Each structure stands twice: as C-alpha cells, then as structure tokens.
Image: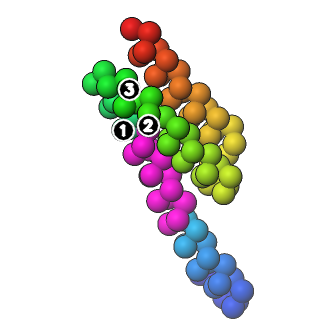
Amino acid sequence: MANHKSAEKRARQALKRRLRNRQAKSQIRTAMKKMRKFVDENQIEEAKSFLPELISLIQKKSDRGILHKNTASRYVSRMTRLINKAAQN
C-alpha cells in the first residue's frame, strides 16, 4: 500500500484510468461483435454502413492511447477484410 501522499494520489489516478480504459476496450469489443453478427446473418448492407462508425471508434481509442496504433490498425484491417469477403460471396 502507498505510504506517501503522492503515491496515494497515483494509486487513485491509476484506478480511475484502469476503469476508463476497461470500459473503452469493452466498447470496442462489443462493436466488433456487432459487426461479426451482421456478417454472420448476411446483413452486408448494415455491416457496410456500420464499418465507418467502428473504424472511427477504434481510431479515437487509439489516438487517446487506450489501444496501440498497430493494434488499432489490425482491428480495422480484420473488420474490413471480413466485410469484403462476405460481400464477395
């Protein structure tokens, strides 16, 4: 446990940040599940219209430092490939 005033403050800040980051990551995962569900149910038009929203969400979280930039790029790439592959079939 923290013994100094500054260390106690750091612990409080870390807790707030951890909860905020956890919520943001959960939001991304939920959106990606929604995208996969659209593709699984052959709702390609809905998936295509949802893709820009998903990309925007991922990029915002990346810009804020919640996701690493390469991780964000990988997520965007995977979701785009998923839709493109489903649209071809």
Q: CA distance from mark 3 to mark 2?
A: 9 Å
Q: Nearer the viewer, residue 22 or 72?
A: 72
Write down the residue under mark 2.
50
Q: Which residues are magenta?
A: 19-32
Q: Earlier in the sequence, mark 3 or mark 1?
A: 1
List x then y, in percent, for residue 67.
Answer: 62, 48
Q: CA distance from mark 1 to mark 2?
A: 9 Å
List x then y, in percent, for residue 47.
Answer: 40, 30
List x then y, in percent, for residue 16.
Answer: 55, 73
The answer to whether residue 36 shows anywhere in this view is no
Q: Is residue 23 magenta?
A: yes
Q: Nearer the viewer, residue 70 or 85?
A: 85
**Residue drawn at (49%, 18%) of the image:** 84
Please identify, in this view, whether the residue under mark 1 or under mark 2 is nearer the observer: 2
Residue 25 vertical placement versus 40 (above, below): below
Q: Earlier in the sequence, mark 3 or mark 2?
A: 3
Please identify, in this view, whether the residue under mark 3 or under mark 1 is nearer the observer: 3
Q: What amino acid is found at the position of numbered circle 3 in the picture?
A: Glu
Crowd rating for badge 2 (residues with CA inside 10 Å; few <14, some 14–19, many 20+) = some
